[in-house]
Image (cartoon, helix red, strand yellow):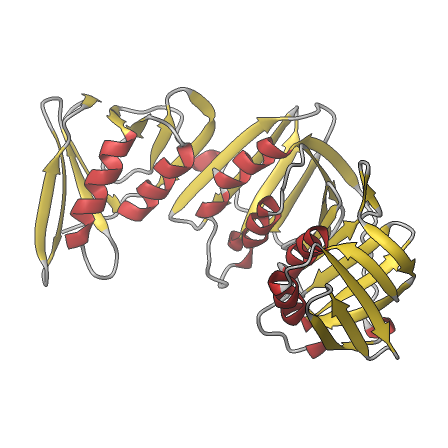
């Protein structure tokens, strides 16, 4: 295997596939990237037990020649070493030659590296052909879907299904739901009316997928029985699906409310950040005391003291109400809404409440209150 390749495009593909390489793996072989030069271009593949990423460098991009002097073949090279070598090389073009199937020589005319490599036939076969139900949508829509929902997924493995983002397509909508049982985030977007599927995707993987979008407009999702594929630009990402039935969440989202607090999002964020400095060491609990005349945010800790702050700009509708909650949950929800003003909607003191953007009904952020004494 040999080729001369544009360094920028090579590094871009290697960096993308490197996202799938686990920092620690029980299988040393999987610490390597598979490089295969074929009729499509240079395919760079990285994989772990949950995710596979394949980025392809084409022979040409527009009028620019990207790969020259090709000699077909494949090899395995340590992902970390290859990434760091390419980052430090200063030339615009890099030559790669595999010698005796054991040495990969990289040269940019100034620097020369000889990296140990492994025969590619030792790498497991990974099927990245789309199967099942497919859906194409704008990348920006998918980014908003993930950013406004996935943060609420659990990070604890006791209930694996709660570490996933539930995607459900049907009736012209794609609905993403995440919950860790103490909070819930749900975002919906419009899609093709005939597409139907339901699946649970590891939430942490979706962050990697959206970070790989680079000047691409369209994303195709392909959902099969136990995996999902994301195809965009010259990149394919495969992820396993999380098995199990996702909790039915429709029944826990309130439809009517008795109290409404309308506030400036940034003022509320700033106030909670300040006050929660003196909240409990175990959880950043704050108390919201609301009436038509004033709204106070307070927190106290037996070891540190107490703090309180009054909001300057607000509108509260309803009788007097006191609600305590984990301030980080509300801060995350407000940041996800990306709105100038937010509305907090309450049923009662100990009932789950909703944080929403009054100008966007496609997002629901639900928080469970906490009992304080």
Q: For residue 347, what is the image quadrant?
A: top left
Furthest residue to the front? Answer: 110
Q: Against 249, is 2 above or below?
A: below
Q: Nearer the viewer, residue 187 or 70?
A: 70
Q: Residue at x 10, y 60 (%)?
A: 304
Q: Residue at x 33, y 38 (%)?
A: 352
Residue situated in front as seen by the camera: 88 or 311: 88
Specify the quadrant of the image occupied by residue 22. bottom right
Going by the image, does 2 lie left or right of 198?
A: right
Q: Position of residue 264 (x, y in %)?
A: 26, 27
Q: Is residue 193 left or right of residue 188?
A: right
Residue 158: x and y in percent read 49, 63
Residue 124 shows in this picture: no
Is 11 drawn above or below residue 112 in the view shown? Answer: above
Instruction: Determine the residue positioned at 23% across, 45% down.
Output: 273
Q: Residue at x 62, y 58 (%)?
A: 19
- Residue sitting nearer the eye, 172 or 231: 231
Q: Is residue 311 above or below residue 211?
A: above
In the rendered image, the quadrant that contains the N terminus is bottom right
Is residue 141 visible to us here? yes
* Residue 110 percent across, percent down from the top left: 69, 67
Q: How many marks?
A: 0
Residue 81 picture location, percent across and down = 64, 71
């Amino acid at each position: 295997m040999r080729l001369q390749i544009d360094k920028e495009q090579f590094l871009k593909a290697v960096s993308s596939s490197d996202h799938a390489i686990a920092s620690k793996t029980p299988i040393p072989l999987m610490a390597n990237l598979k490089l295969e030069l074929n009729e499509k271009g240079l395919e760079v593949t990285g994989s772990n037990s949950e995710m596979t990423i394949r980025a392809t460098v084409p022979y040409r991009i527009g009028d620019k020649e990207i790969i020259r002097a090709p000699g077909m073949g494949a090899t395995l090279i340590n992902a970390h070493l290859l990434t760091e070598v390419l980052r430090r090389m200063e030339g615009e073009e890099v030559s790669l030659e595999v010698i005796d199937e054991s040495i990969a020589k990289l040269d940019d005319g100034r620097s020369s590296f000889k990296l140990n490599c492994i025969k590619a036939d030792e790498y497991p076969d990974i099927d990245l052909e789309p199967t099942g139900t497919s859906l194409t949508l704008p990348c920006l829509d998918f980014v908003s879907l993930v950013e406004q929902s996935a943060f609420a997924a659990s990070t604890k493995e006791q209930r694996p299904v709660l570490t996933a983002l539930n995607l459900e397509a049907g009736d012209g909508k794609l609905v993403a739901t995440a919950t860790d049982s103490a909070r819930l985030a749900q975002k919906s977007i419009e899609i093709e009316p005939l597409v139907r599927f339901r699946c649970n995707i590891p939430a942490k993987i979706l962050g990697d997928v959206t970070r790989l979008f680079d000047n691409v407009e369209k994303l195709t999702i392909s959902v099969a029985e136990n995996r999902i594929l994301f195809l965009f630009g010259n990149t394919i990402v495969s992820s396993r699906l999380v098995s199990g039935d996702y909790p039915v969440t429709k029944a826990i989202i309130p439809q009517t409310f008795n109290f409404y607090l309308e506030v400036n999002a940034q003022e509320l964020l700033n106030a909670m950040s300040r006050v929660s400095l003196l909240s409990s060491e175990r959880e950043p609990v704050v108390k919201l005391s609301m009436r038509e005349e004033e709204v106070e945010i307070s927190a106290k800790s037996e070891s540190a003291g107490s703090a309180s702050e009054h909001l300057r700009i607000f509108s509260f509708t309803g009788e007097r109400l006191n609600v305590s909650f984990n301030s980080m949950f509300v801060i995350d929800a407000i940041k996800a809404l990306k709105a100038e003003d937010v509305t907090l909607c309450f049923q009662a003191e100990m009932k789950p409440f909703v944080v929403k953007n009054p100008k966007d009904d496609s997002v629901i952020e639900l928080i469970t209150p906490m009992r304080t004494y």
